[in-house]
Image (cartoon, coloured by chain):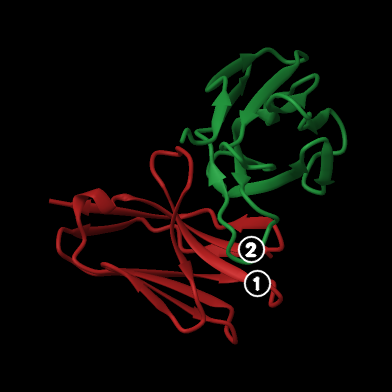
Amino acid sequence: RKEVEQDPGPFNVPEGATVAFNCTYSNSASQSFFWYRQDCRKEPKLLMSVYSSGNEDGRFTAQLNRASQYISLLIRDSKLSDSATYLCVVNNDYKLSFGAGTTVTVRA
Amino acid sequence: NAGVMQNPRHLVRRRGQEARLRCSPMKGHSHVYWYRQLPEEGLKFMVYLQKENIIDESGMPKERFSAEFPKEGPSILRIQQVVRGDSAAYFCASSLDSPGTYNEQFFGPGTRLTVL
């Protein structure tokens, strides 16, 4: 079983739409959680950390369910610039475990 | 403040040759991590180094791969006698402090290795 599993998509949505996707992780002892963004297989860039209470950063909302080992990301009011691959990342000490990514394409 | 630097950005080698990938962490960062991304897969942890020390190399293949982070100069990931399966993107990341729960790792642009 992979450490982090994501729905690969692709999610193809119009501008202004809401899109949501999630990932699951296998190690119940995982300590911290993140969403990264990767454009055209360039370097991953941190989008946001994910906290147990859930957190929001502008149009992005992340949720963590430790009991179900489940992390979600919701993007509201999608922009063309949101088109990217979103990587679910789980931290165990210093080792980041990455999902294979969910591809989102926002169309005009 | 320059970000994490990696070079070369693209590297082509023939089977059996050696590949050397270099990574300069962000200024003031003394913790370096290497990850490999195979086509259609997520990034996989390879090795964690501090200056002059390998802390964890549990993700490194046992043969042909080695890494170092000398007191002066960049971190080097070396792959000897490359094979086609080594073709991948190799990303380096650095962090400021000891790895902590929410201590961000900043990634370099990667080196794309192609083995012919």
Label 1: chain letter? A
The answer to whether residue B37 of the structure is visible from this angle is no
Residue drawn at x 19%, y 56% as measured from the top left: A79
Question: Quick one: which chain is green?
Answer: B
Q: Provide the residue designation for mark 1.
A: A31
Q: Quadrant of residue A68?
A: bottom right
Q: Position of residue A39 (x, y in %)?
A: 38, 43
**Place of residue B38 in the rendered image (x, y in percent of width and height, measured from the top left):** 60, 39
State the residue at coordinates (73%, 23%). Answer: B83
Mark 1 neighbour density, 10 Å: few (under 14) some (14–19) many (20 or more): some
Residue depicted at x 56% and y 64%: A5
- Within 10 Å of disc 2 (Cα), the crowding (few <14, some 14-19, many 20+) is many
A94 displayed left or right of A101: right
Q: Position of residue A38 (x, y in %)?
A: 43, 46
Q: Is residue B48 or residue B13 the one in the foreground?
A: B48
Question: What residue sits right under mark 2 in the picture?
Answer: A91
Which of marks 1 and 2 precedes in the sequence? 1
In the rendered picture, chain A carries what hue? red
Q: Amino acid at mark 1?
A: Gln
Q: Look at the image and tell me in which quarter the C terminus of chain B lies.
A: top right
Q: Are marks 2 and 1 in contact (CB under 8 Å)?
A: yes
With B53 as the anchor, is A66 left or right in this view?
left
User: Where is A41 relative to B83, above or below?
Assistant: below
Tell which subunit mark 2 falls on: A
Instruction: Tell me the element at label 2.
Output: strand
